[in-house]
Image: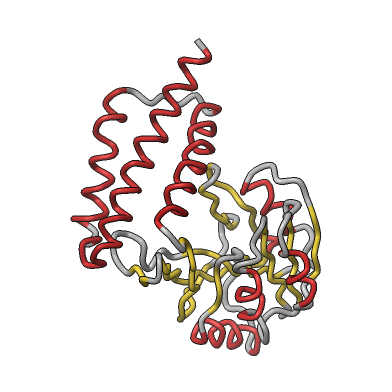
């Protein structure tokens, strides 16, 4: 069993070295598919032995599906540039390699670091992701920017011990900026599918989002940052439907 680790990037000089270094010993090749970064991403990735390929970004799902075609090996480990394998997850993947795969895909828990705080509540953990799979048996799907890998019917998945460490936001401002960016993509995707954002969704979905994350899923247990996450997530829900509503108004 040989594994191609595949990473998509754009201006990830802050994160890419940590990501690639965490793959040593488990990935037989590291492929970085870059959307024409203007920082030091290429220099760092090549310096660490990754194969570096550039491709125009047309959406998260589209980019990740294209990136798979650049992998040499059938088994693909998909990792984002701001993620890294912890020691337990590294050992779990090595155990699969040294034996023989008992499944067609493997899920793992993702643990997020938010402004220096490891977030374990509010629906942010375990945040199970399917990230290791036989690429001949599935493809990336979902609605941008929320991609997910889907295996074919009749395939089997298993769960790996350990965490995929996600170094998400270094500041609250980073979170606010990305919420604005992602809600624009999400609104356009909903509009393309003919979805509408009525006043009820605009009024009540943000409230439900906040209460669901902060109260029902225990976001309050993560202290100040738990509150900030819940508040920005609620605002992002509002922005998504407000932007969707604006798109329909512009079309009319």
- Image quadrant holding the N terminus, namely bottom right
- Residue 45: quarter of image: bottom right
Residue 160 picture location, percent across and down: 49, 78
Taking the image as shown, residue 216 lies to the left or right of residue 113, namely: left
Name above or below for residue 140 compared with residue 45.
Answer: above
Which residue of the protein is positioned furthest toward the left in this rendering?
A: 215
Taking the image as shown, residue 2 lies to the left or right of residue 236, namely: right
Which residue of the protein is positioned furthest toward the top in this rendering?
A: 252
Coloring basis for residues: secondary structure
Taking the image as shown, residue 47 lies to the left or right of residue 89, namely: right
Residue 159 picture location, percent across and down: 47, 74
Q: Please name the residue shown 62% across and 48% down the image.
A: 61
Residue 13 picture location, percent across and down: 66, 66
Name above or below for residue 98 compared with residue 210.
Answer: below
Taking the image as shown, residue 113 lies to the left or right of residue 223, namely: right
**6 or 203: which is nearer to us?**
203
**19 or 192: which is nearer to us?**
19
Q: Please name the residue shown 68% across and 68% down the image.
A: 76
Name above or below for residue 70 compared with residue 97.
Answer: above
Q: Please name the residue shown 57% across and 56% down the image.
A: 149
- Residue 229: quarter of image: bottom left
Q: Please name the residue shown 28% across and 61% down the image.
A: 226
Residue 232 picture location, percent across and down: 34, 48
- Residue 137: quarter of image: bottom right
């Amino acid at each position: 069993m040989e594994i191609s680790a595949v990473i998509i990037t754009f201006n990830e000089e802050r994160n890419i070295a940590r990501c690639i270094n965490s793959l040593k010993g488990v990935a037989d090749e590291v492929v970085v598919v870059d959307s024409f970064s203007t920082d030091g991403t290429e220099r760092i990735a090549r310096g660490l032995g990754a194969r570096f390929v550039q491709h125009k970004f047309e959406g998260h799902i589209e980019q990740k599906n294209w990136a798979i075609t650049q992998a040499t090996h059938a088994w693909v480990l998909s990792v984002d540039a701001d993620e890294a394998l912890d020691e337990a997850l590294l050992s779990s993947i090595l155990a699969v390699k040294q034996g023989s795969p008992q499944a067609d895909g493997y899920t793992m828990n993702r643990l997020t670091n938010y402004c220096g705080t490891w977030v374990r509540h509010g629906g942010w953990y375990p945040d199970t992701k399917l990230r290791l799979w036989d690429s001949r048996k599935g493809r990336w799907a979902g609605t941008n920017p929320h991609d997910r890998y889907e295996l074919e019917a009749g395939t089997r998945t298993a769960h790996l011990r350990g965490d995929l460490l996600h170094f998400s936001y270094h500041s609250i401002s980073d979170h606010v900026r990305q919420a604005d960016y992602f809600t624009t993509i999400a609104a356009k995707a909903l509009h393309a599918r003919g979805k509408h954002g009525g006043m009820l969704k605009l009024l009540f979905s943000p409230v439900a989002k906040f209460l669901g994350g902060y109260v029902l899923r225990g976001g309050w247990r993560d202290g100040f940052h738990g509150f900030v996450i819940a508040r920005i997530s609620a605002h992002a829900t509002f922005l998504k439907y407000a932007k969707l509503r604006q798109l329909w108004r512009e079309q009319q």
